[in-house]
Amino acid sequence: MPILGIGFALYSTIHQAGNSVASQRLGAKDFINLAGTYGSLLILSLLTGLVMAVIFIFGADLLISLMGLTDELAAISKIYLQTLGFGTWLLALRFAVAAILSSQGKTKWNMWSTGLMSIINIIFNYLLIDGKFGMPALGVQGIAVASVLAWGIRLLFSFYIICRHFKINISFPSCWQSLKKMTTPILKIAMPSTIEPMSWQLTQLIMTAMVVTMGSVSLATRIYSFNLLFVTILYGMAISSGVQIKVAFLIGARKIDLAQQELIKGIKIGVLGVIVFMVILISFSQYFFSIFTTNKEIWFLGSSILLVAILGELGRSFNLIVGASLRACGDAKYTAIVGFISMWFIAVPLTWLFGIHLSWGLVGVWLGCSIDESIRGFSSMRRWRSKKWQSKGLYAKNHQVENEQ
């Protein structure tokens, strides 16, 4: 999953960049370029998905060996990685159509399509893992096939909603110059923004390799703890996405004060939600861990991880919400530089120091990651307060010219 996460992070970055550019164009009522932005976003996502498919399929052996997996685990991982890699271009397009609907404020249709995808995934998992009702018993490969089928069906559903239900205008570039013109604003946000999530995924690979050396209990606890915390992370990502859309729209409409108000409101909602989720997870930690395992050693270690994670999740809420808003305004380079420096020169060294050198184990690894998240969240908030992002938007130069006149 950390390997596949590299592709997911890349698609998500392009999704957010396309969403930001489209939202700014909507705010500025630039409908002609809006249609071209949508078409270019689809082409860019498709090309990126095809490139990642080639990497996952033909580079599977190398990528798996870097994770330190051998023998049966390596063989299973290769099947899973190559099967999902074959259909990863569908996921890339799925992110693109989600950006189109989000920029239009039709986020509930992304929710419905995700619900459909989840149901399809569960059904095909049931049918293909053990071979129910005459279907082939594919085991781990069946899990991957179910995901690819779910991606494809969700993609078709979303395209139907976009083209037939809402009749959203999408214009594909007629030549290379047109494609370059439309993708440039997206890439200006996406390319530096890619550094942060890609760095996160790569550092997660390193940290996973560290945890592997700590034994199976630590590895299992890390997976189960992250699964529980992912509920909190998803909440933060959802708030971040909503704030990003509103801020980008208001920046495009040149309503800076309202954009500021929306960000502060989003931070309050985000932090409150994180506190509620963490209190619930910590209070009932043993019950939640019992869903995954009966091993009480994992229960107690996992409870310690959740206590340490409070710091990280609060920092992450600021990092997600404020960072996404900075990128939505076109100030992507700052978050990319700070994210890269913090993850490679703070997170990785601290996780090694606490987890390996001082022998604090998985708790030390989580503490290092939590400090990194908090530093990045603080840096993003400080950047927003500096107001330097006001000169970075898609229509910022036009706004400056108007003010001078």
Image (cartoon, rainbow, N blue to C red):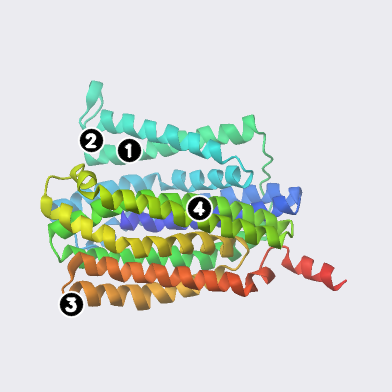
**Looking at the image, which is closer to me, 343 or 290?**
290
Q: Earlier in the sequence, mark 2 or mark 1?
A: 2
Earlier in the chain: of badge 4 and badge 2, it is 2
> Do we see residue 53 in this rendering?
no
Residue behind mark 2: 138
Q: Are marks 1 and 3 in contact (CB under 8 Å)?
A: no
Are circles 2 and 1 on residues that touch, CB within 8 Å?
yes
Mark 1 and mark 3 lie on one chain; the one further toward the N terminus is 1
**Alpha carbon separation for disc pair 4 and 1:** 37 Å
| Type of amino acid under label 2 | Leu
Location of mark 4 (residue): 269
Q: Quadrant of the image for the C terminus?
A: bottom right
Q: Residue at x 31, y 73 (%)?
A: 348
| Residue 358: numbered disc | 3
Q: Give the CA distance from mark 2 to mark 1.
A: 9 Å
Report the Cα–Cα distance between label 4 and label 3.
37 Å
Per the image, the residue denoted by label 1 is 145
Asked if residue 80 lies left or right of residue 262, the reply is: left
Crowding at mark 3 (Cα within 10 Å: few <14, some 14-19, many 20+): few
Amino acid type at mark 1: Val
Q: Are marks 4 and 2 in contact (CB under 8 Å)?
A: no
Q: Image quarter for residue 250?
A: bottom right
Residue 249 seen in this snapshot = yes
Secondary structure at numbered mark 4: helix
Mark-to-mark CA distance, 2 and 3: 43 Å
